[in-house]
Amino acid sequence: MRFVRRACARGAVVALVLGTAVLAAVGCDSDGGEGSSSGGSSSGDGGGTASTKPAWMGLTGARQADLPHETPGVTTSFVTGEQCRQCHQANEANKNAVRDAKGRDVSPGTTWRKSMMGLAARDPFYLAAWAEERVTMPGIKGAIDGVCSRCHATAGNVETGGKLSFEDLVSGTSNEARVARDGVTCTVCHQIQAAGLGTPASFTGGFTIGASRELYGPHLGPATGPMTLIVNYTPVYSNHVVKSSFCATCHTVITPARDDAGALVGAQFPEQTPYLEWQNSAFQDEVPPTGPRAMSCVGCHAPAYDDDNQGIKTALSVNPTGLAARDPFGRHHFAGGSSSMLRLMAKNAAWVGTDVAPSELEDQAKRSDAHLSKAAELAVVEQKREGGTLIVRVKVTNSTGHKLPTGYPSRRMWLHLAVKDGATTTWESGAWDAYGRIVDGAKLVDVPGTFQPHRDVVSAPGEVQIWEGVAGKQDGSMAGRLLEAAKYVKDDRLLPEGYKADHKVAIYMRPQGVAGDPDFGSSDTVTYKITPAPPPGAAIAVELVYQSIKPSDLDALAKKPTPIALKFFDLVESSPIVPVVMVRAESRAP
């Protein structure tokens, strides 16, 4: 019998891309690089106990002060979002604008500012990773600042010619620092020009901002007078802002591998490639003919439908009144998989420096969880007995247009399977503790400095199937920092539906470490061999679990803790990066 829990056929589609000019960046073998994991896999047989506190807890040292509070800023090319919200946020005076058919606020001013896009420059994990790179390689600190601020603190980076420093962002009072702290702000995205998008030159923040103060949008014949008068920008029609190549500029990141002195030591590393993954999928809509799954990044992450799945048609601005309703109208929630970080920020809004109410951040976190629930299907596809062993086969299917999980390699997902005889758990794989570490009873499975190999068969509680990308150094050992990463030593993230091994971009996304697993692809079936077999009727519960920041990332930051890392640890201790259960399936032992 087949037991299944479906999670929406059209899940998260995040677009990010790598170009053919960086063929050597991947670190894959020319034949596809699908060899076994090496140099750091763990069988989960020991290396610590669940009672051992993480290395990042209890560290002493100066902490980063509160980030500056949201303050209006105006530079030559940019303004902070509160100026845009004058007209593009719902109000009581004009209930016919930026609302859905039921009167709910769908305005960019409300939805964007509580998203990780709006909070990109205030993300403490991002800031801690940036600070660590600077401390490790002080000789190239300026170059690191330029790269790390380009996409998270974009307006400040552009306005300073790439010279915005870490100190400017976390404590500066200039207008450049103020617009930088506005994250991926309105006047950044809507000023990105169409030229060059989707090409290798546009990746890793290689977008172009014009000097004409034109703001691009997907609607013909915009009313130009109000915006020109109030903020001195001119709205202009251009459909490039809803294409996946538009998102690819910052969500395709390629970094050069370096040693601690900052010297180049290997190939460039494809930190994240969702756009290429999307190009090599059944979801791409750039090259005709397209199929029924075709969807752009914006179509999924800024959907033009409301919470009832109805299309939105509304006036785009509350000022002036009487503007015609437009469609499509994309909600700027930009939901992804960062609910833990949003909840951390909600509990620590004073330190983050945001005016967004904790309740709004919690609402956004719930949207992220709901988004994750649509990203995969989970099914128990077979159960049988072989002697004293119960065989359970579990299938996970990727419902997104990119790898699952995708993006920055701090993300992972795994299977948690538990067998219960009455109230007693008799067998369990994939449990976790209060710190988000995977455990086997009293033993740590997340042993620092190791990773679990890809598993087609799980035959002991200490074995766990984890789908993840593990960054490695040039010598094949695990990388603790982004800029020392040269290749993936493990990458068994589920491929998107429609993946073709001979696609022109396949070299950038080929799996690593899945040899011997014949059914690995856009779905993967894991066979559990449970001994001794439970009695007939025993409950079997399976969960697909997601975590946005691995314990190993916190361990790495603890090796050379900076003031911002120490503060981040404090925040995590008060609001742990707990795993999110994406989807569940249940059955009974035969």
Image (spheres, rainbow, N blue to C red):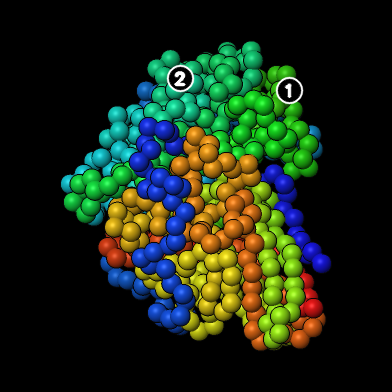
Q: Which mark is residue 40?
A: none
Q: Name the residue: 52% across, 46% down.
A: 116
Figure quadrant of residue 292: top right
Location of mark 1 (residue) = 325
Position of residue 22 measured from the top left corner of the image (x, y, whole percent): 37, 36
Q: Nearer the viewer, residue 471 or 243?
A: 471
Q: CA distance from mark 1 to mark 2?
A: 30 Å
Q: Which mark is residue 195?
A: 2
Q: Name the residue: 67% across, 26% down.
A: 289
Where is 367 relative to 177, above or below?
below
Q: Nearer the viewer, residue 304 or 255?
A: 255
Secondary structure beneath dot 2 equals loop
Give whichever of discs 1 and 2 has the lower sequence position. 2
Where is 438 relative to 95, above or below?
below
Position of residue 75 measured from the top left corner of the image (x, y, whole percent): 37, 27
Res 489 visible: yes
Amino acid type, label 1: Ala
